Amino acid sequence: MRALRVLRDANLVAAEDTRRTAKLLSHYGIPTPTLSFHAHNSRARLPQLLGRLERGESVALVTDAGTPGISDPGVELVAACRERGIAVDPIPGASAALLAAVASGFPLNSVTILGFPPLKAKDRTAWFLALAQSQHAVVFFESPHRVVSTLEELGKCLLERRICVAREMTKTHQEFRIGAANDPEFLSINQKGEFTLVVAPVEAGSATPPDVDDDSIVAAFRALEGNRAAGGKRRAISQVARNLGISANEVYRAIERAKL
Protein backbone atom coordinates (compact mmCIF):
# COMPACT_ATOMS: atom_id res chain seq x y z
CA MET A 1 0.00 0.00 0.00
CA ARG A 2 2.87 2.34 0.73
CA ALA A 3 4.32 1.74 -2.75
CA LEU A 4 0.97 2.61 -4.36
CA ARG A 5 0.75 5.81 -2.30
CA VAL A 6 4.27 6.83 -3.36
CA LEU A 7 3.47 6.21 -7.03
CA ARG A 8 0.29 8.24 -6.71
CA ASP A 9 1.90 11.19 -4.89
CA ALA A 10 5.08 11.42 -7.02
CA ASN A 11 5.44 14.10 -9.66
CA LEU A 12 6.98 11.59 -12.07
CA VAL A 13 7.54 7.84 -12.38
CA ALA A 14 10.88 6.92 -13.99
CA ALA A 15 10.32 3.44 -15.45
CA GLU A 16 12.54 0.85 -17.11
CA ASP A 17 9.65 0.06 -19.48
CA THR A 18 6.88 2.68 -19.52
CA ARG A 19 4.49 0.31 -21.29
CA ARG A 20 4.61 -2.26 -18.51
CA THR A 21 4.48 0.36 -15.79
CA ALA A 22 1.52 2.03 -17.49
CA LYS A 23 -0.47 -1.19 -17.05
CA LEU A 24 0.30 -1.20 -13.33
CA LEU A 25 -0.61 2.46 -12.89
CA SER A 26 -3.79 2.07 -14.93
CA HIS A 27 -4.87 -0.95 -12.89
CA TYR A 28 -4.74 1.11 -9.70
CA GLY A 29 -6.08 4.32 -11.26
CA ILE A 30 -2.81 6.25 -10.76
CA PRO A 31 -2.47 9.18 -13.21
CA THR A 32 1.21 10.03 -12.51
CA PRO A 33 3.13 10.66 -15.76
CA THR A 34 6.01 8.32 -16.69
CA LEU A 35 9.43 8.76 -18.27
CA SER A 36 11.60 5.93 -19.61
CA PHE A 37 14.86 5.34 -17.72
CA HIS A 38 16.91 2.29 -18.67
CA ALA A 39 20.45 1.16 -19.48
CA HIS A 40 20.37 2.57 -23.03
CA ASN A 41 19.27 6.13 -22.18
CA SER A 42 20.53 6.60 -18.62
CA ARG A 43 23.27 9.07 -19.62
CA ALA A 44 20.74 11.43 -21.21
CA ARG A 45 18.03 10.90 -18.59
CA LEU A 46 20.14 11.40 -15.46
CA PRO A 47 20.52 15.21 -15.86
CA GLN A 48 16.75 15.51 -16.54
CA LEU A 49 15.78 13.55 -13.44
CA LEU A 50 18.33 15.30 -11.23
CA GLY A 51 17.13 18.68 -12.46
CA ARG A 52 13.55 17.91 -11.47
CA LEU A 53 14.62 16.55 -8.10
CA GLU A 54 16.72 19.64 -7.37
CA ARG A 55 13.66 21.78 -8.16
CA GLY A 56 11.86 20.01 -5.33
CA GLU A 57 9.85 17.48 -7.35
CA SER A 58 9.60 13.83 -6.33
CA VAL A 59 10.50 10.98 -8.68
CA ALA A 60 9.53 7.34 -8.14
CA LEU A 61 11.83 4.77 -9.77
CA VAL A 62 10.33 1.50 -11.07
CA THR A 63 11.99 -1.47 -12.78
CA ASP A 64 10.44 -4.36 -14.72
CA ALA A 65 11.35 -7.04 -12.18
CA GLY A 66 13.03 -7.10 -8.78
CA THR A 67 14.31 -4.19 -6.73
CA PRO A 68 15.58 -1.04 -8.51
CA GLY A 69 19.29 -0.35 -8.16
CA ILE A 70 20.48 -3.97 -8.53
CA SER A 71 22.02 -4.56 -11.97
CA ASP A 72 20.17 -1.60 -13.50
CA PRO A 73 20.89 2.16 -13.86
CA GLY A 74 18.98 2.90 -10.66
CA VAL A 75 22.28 2.68 -8.80
CA GLU A 76 23.65 5.60 -10.86
CA LEU A 77 20.64 7.75 -10.02
CA VAL A 78 20.86 6.96 -6.31
CA ALA A 79 24.61 7.66 -6.23
CA ALA A 80 24.07 11.01 -8.00
CA CYS A 81 21.32 11.92 -5.54
CA ARG A 82 23.58 11.14 -2.58
CA GLU A 83 26.33 13.33 -4.03
CA ARG A 84 23.89 16.25 -4.32
CA GLY A 85 22.27 15.77 -0.93
CA ILE A 86 18.92 14.69 -2.42
CA ALA A 87 16.93 12.39 -0.14
CA VAL A 88 16.50 8.76 -1.23
CA ASP A 89 13.64 6.74 0.26
CA PRO A 90 13.71 2.99 -0.55
CA ILE A 91 10.34 1.22 -0.66
CA PRO A 92 10.56 -2.45 0.42
CA GLY A 93 9.70 -4.91 -2.33
CA ALA A 94 10.67 -8.17 -3.97
CA SER A 95 14.40 -8.78 -4.46
CA ALA A 96 15.29 -11.63 -6.82
CA ALA A 97 18.67 -12.24 -5.16
CA LEU A 98 17.27 -12.54 -1.64
CA LEU A 99 14.19 -14.51 -2.68
CA ALA A 100 16.29 -17.10 -4.52
CA ALA A 101 18.79 -17.36 -1.66
CA VAL A 102 16.03 -17.91 0.91
CA ALA A 103 14.19 -20.46 -1.26
CA SER A 104 17.41 -22.44 -1.87
CA GLY A 105 17.62 -23.63 1.71
CA PHE A 106 21.40 -23.11 1.67
CA PRO A 107 23.20 -21.66 4.74
CA LEU A 108 23.21 -17.88 4.39
CA ASN A 109 25.55 -16.65 7.12
CA SER A 110 27.50 -14.87 4.38
CA VAL A 111 26.14 -14.08 0.92
CA THR A 112 27.70 -12.33 -2.09
CA ILE A 113 25.61 -10.87 -4.93
CA LEU A 114 27.57 -10.67 -8.19
CA GLY A 115 25.08 -9.37 -10.77
CA PHE A 116 25.43 -10.76 -14.33
CA PRO A 117 28.48 -12.73 -15.61
CA PRO A 118 30.62 -10.98 -18.27
CA LEU A 119 29.87 -11.51 -21.96
CA LYS A 120 33.38 -12.06 -23.39
CA ALA A 121 34.63 -15.67 -23.26
CA LYS A 122 37.94 -14.91 -21.53
CA ASP A 123 36.29 -12.69 -18.92
CA ARG A 124 33.56 -15.28 -18.32
CA THR A 125 36.14 -18.00 -17.73
CA ALA A 126 38.00 -15.91 -15.17
CA TRP A 127 34.68 -14.89 -13.55
CA PHE A 128 33.51 -18.49 -13.07
CA LEU A 129 36.89 -19.63 -11.81
CA ALA A 130 36.85 -16.84 -9.22
CA LEU A 131 33.29 -17.80 -8.23
CA ALA A 132 34.45 -21.39 -7.67
CA GLN A 133 36.98 -20.11 -5.13
CA SER A 134 34.30 -18.54 -2.93
CA GLN A 135 33.65 -20.52 0.24
CA HIS A 136 30.26 -18.95 1.03
CA ALA A 137 26.93 -18.58 -0.79
CA VAL A 138 26.95 -16.63 -4.06
CA VAL A 139 23.95 -15.26 -5.96
CA PHE A 140 23.96 -13.96 -9.52
CA PHE A 141 21.65 -13.36 -12.46
CA GLU A 142 21.64 -14.69 -16.00
CA SER A 143 19.70 -14.02 -19.19
CA PRO A 144 17.52 -16.80 -20.66
CA HIS A 145 19.59 -17.22 -23.84
CA ARG A 146 22.85 -17.71 -21.89
CA VAL A 147 21.60 -19.71 -18.90
CA VAL A 148 22.41 -23.14 -20.39
CA SER A 149 26.00 -22.20 -21.27
CA THR A 150 26.36 -20.76 -17.76
CA LEU A 151 25.08 -23.99 -16.22
CA GLU A 152 27.65 -25.89 -18.31
CA GLU A 153 30.39 -23.62 -16.92
CA LEU A 154 29.17 -24.13 -13.35
CA GLY A 155 29.21 -27.89 -13.85
CA LYS A 156 32.87 -27.73 -14.88
CA CYS A 157 33.98 -25.33 -12.14
CA LEU A 158 31.85 -26.47 -9.20
CA LEU A 159 31.43 -30.19 -9.94
CA GLU A 160 29.20 -31.62 -7.16
CA ARG A 161 28.77 -28.36 -5.22
CA ARG A 162 25.07 -27.62 -4.97
CA ILE A 163 23.31 -24.85 -6.86
CA CYS A 164 19.76 -23.54 -7.02
CA VAL A 165 18.33 -22.30 -10.32
CA ALA A 166 15.34 -20.03 -9.74
CA ARG A 167 13.13 -19.08 -12.68
CA GLU A 168 10.25 -16.59 -12.84
CA MET A 169 10.07 -16.07 -9.07
CA THR A 170 6.74 -14.77 -7.70
CA LYS A 171 5.20 -15.22 -11.17
CA THR A 172 2.79 -17.77 -12.63
CA HIS A 173 5.48 -20.18 -13.89
CA GLN A 174 7.79 -20.00 -10.85
CA GLU A 175 10.30 -22.87 -10.76
CA PHE A 176 13.18 -23.91 -8.51
CA ARG A 177 15.72 -26.63 -9.27
CA ILE A 178 18.32 -27.67 -6.71
CA GLY A 179 21.11 -30.19 -7.11
CA ALA A 180 24.77 -30.79 -7.90
CA ALA A 181 26.20 -28.25 -10.35
CA ASN A 182 27.32 -31.01 -12.71
CA ASP A 183 23.88 -32.66 -12.85
CA PRO A 184 23.08 -32.90 -16.61
CA GLU A 185 19.36 -32.44 -15.90
CA PHE A 186 19.99 -28.73 -15.32
CA LEU A 187 20.74 -28.36 -19.04
CA SER A 188 17.13 -29.23 -19.93
CA ILE A 189 15.65 -26.32 -17.98
CA ASN A 190 13.01 -24.13 -19.63
CA GLN A 191 14.98 -21.18 -21.04
CA LYS A 192 12.15 -18.64 -20.83
CA GLY A 193 11.90 -15.99 -18.13
CA GLU A 194 14.06 -14.30 -15.51
CA PHE A 195 16.83 -16.42 -13.95
CA THR A 196 18.63 -16.13 -10.61
CA LEU A 197 21.25 -18.69 -9.60
CA VAL A 198 22.47 -19.49 -6.09
CA VAL A 199 25.71 -21.35 -5.37
CA ALA A 200 25.77 -23.12 -2.01
CA PRO A 201 28.63 -22.48 0.41
CA VAL A 202 31.35 -25.11 0.64
CA GLU A 203 30.11 -27.79 3.02
CA ALA A 204 31.79 -28.02 6.40
CA GLY A 205 34.18 -30.93 6.64
CA SER A 206 34.96 -31.01 2.93
CA ALA A 207 38.35 -32.50 2.23
CA THR A 208 41.18 -29.99 2.04
CA PRO A 209 42.93 -30.15 -1.35
CA PRO A 210 46.56 -31.25 -1.24
CA ASP A 211 49.38 -28.77 -1.83
CA VAL A 212 50.33 -28.94 -5.50
CA ASP A 213 53.09 -26.81 -7.01
CA ASP A 214 53.03 -25.07 -10.39
CA ASP A 215 55.29 -27.70 -11.98
CA SER A 216 52.81 -30.47 -11.15
CA ILE A 217 49.90 -28.45 -12.50
CA VAL A 218 51.70 -27.54 -15.73
CA ALA A 219 52.79 -31.13 -16.26
CA ALA A 220 49.23 -32.39 -15.81
CA PHE A 221 47.93 -29.70 -18.16
CA ARG A 222 50.47 -30.54 -20.86
CA ALA A 223 49.57 -34.22 -20.55
CA LEU A 224 46.11 -33.28 -21.76
CA GLU A 225 47.48 -31.24 -24.67
CA GLY A 226 46.44 -33.84 -27.23
CA ASN A 227 42.82 -33.75 -26.05
CA ARG A 228 42.49 -29.97 -25.84
CA ALA A 229 41.39 -29.55 -29.44
CA ALA A 230 38.19 -31.48 -28.72
CA GLY A 231 37.32 -29.96 -25.37
CA GLY A 232 39.14 -26.64 -25.33
CA LYS A 233 41.30 -25.00 -22.71
CA ARG A 234 38.51 -24.61 -20.16
CA ARG A 235 37.67 -28.30 -20.22
CA ALA A 236 41.36 -29.17 -19.78
CA ILE A 237 41.56 -26.81 -16.78
CA SER A 238 38.53 -28.47 -15.19
CA GLN A 239 39.92 -31.95 -15.82
CA VAL A 240 43.32 -31.09 -14.29
CA ALA A 241 41.57 -29.60 -11.24
CA ARG A 242 39.58 -32.81 -10.77
CA ASN A 243 42.66 -35.00 -11.24
CA LEU A 244 44.74 -33.06 -8.71
CA GLY A 245 41.95 -32.34 -6.23
CA ILE A 246 42.40 -28.56 -6.38
CA SER A 247 40.29 -25.66 -7.63
CA ALA A 248 40.05 -24.75 -11.30
CA ASN A 249 41.16 -21.24 -10.36
CA GLU A 250 44.50 -22.58 -9.05
CA VAL A 251 45.05 -24.43 -12.32
CA TYR A 252 44.17 -21.33 -14.36
CA ARG A 253 46.64 -19.15 -12.43
CA ALA A 254 49.42 -21.71 -12.72
CA ILE A 255 49.14 -22.04 -16.51
CA GLU A 256 48.86 -18.25 -16.84
CA ARG A 257 52.13 -17.89 -14.92
CA ALA A 258 53.65 -20.51 -17.22
CA LYS A 259 52.32 -18.55 -20.22
CA LEU A 260 50.62 -21.63 -21.73
Image (tube, rainbow, N blue to C red):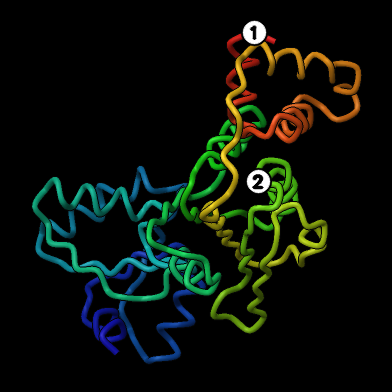
- Where is residue 38 drawn, in percent x and y? 44, 54
Q: Is residue 34 left or right of residue 236?
A: left
The CA distance from mark 1 to mark 2 is 25 Å
- How crowded pointer 2 is (Cα within 10 Å; few <14, some 14-19, many 20+) is rated as many
- How crowded pointer 1 is (Cα within 10 Å; few <14, some 14-19, many 20+) is rated as few
- Where is residue 120 drawn, in percent x and y? 63, 32
The secondary element bearing badge 2 is classed as: helix
Is 176 located above or below residue 191 in the figure?
A: below
Nearer mark to the viewer, of 1 and 2: 2
The kind of residue tagged 2 is Leu
Q: Quadrant of residue 229?
A: top right
Q: Is residue 87 left or right of residue 12?
A: left
Q: Residue at x 21, y 81 (%)?
A: 9
The secondary element bearing badge 1 is classed as: loop
- Where is residue 113 drawn, in percent x and y? 43, 53
- Where is residue 35 drawn, in percent x and y? 37, 64
Is 151 located above or below residue 164 in the figure?
A: above
Would you name the residue on which mark 2 appears? Answer: 158
Would you name the residue on which mark 1 appears? Answer: 259
Q: Is residue 83 left or right of residue 154?
A: left
The kind of residue tagged 1 is Lys
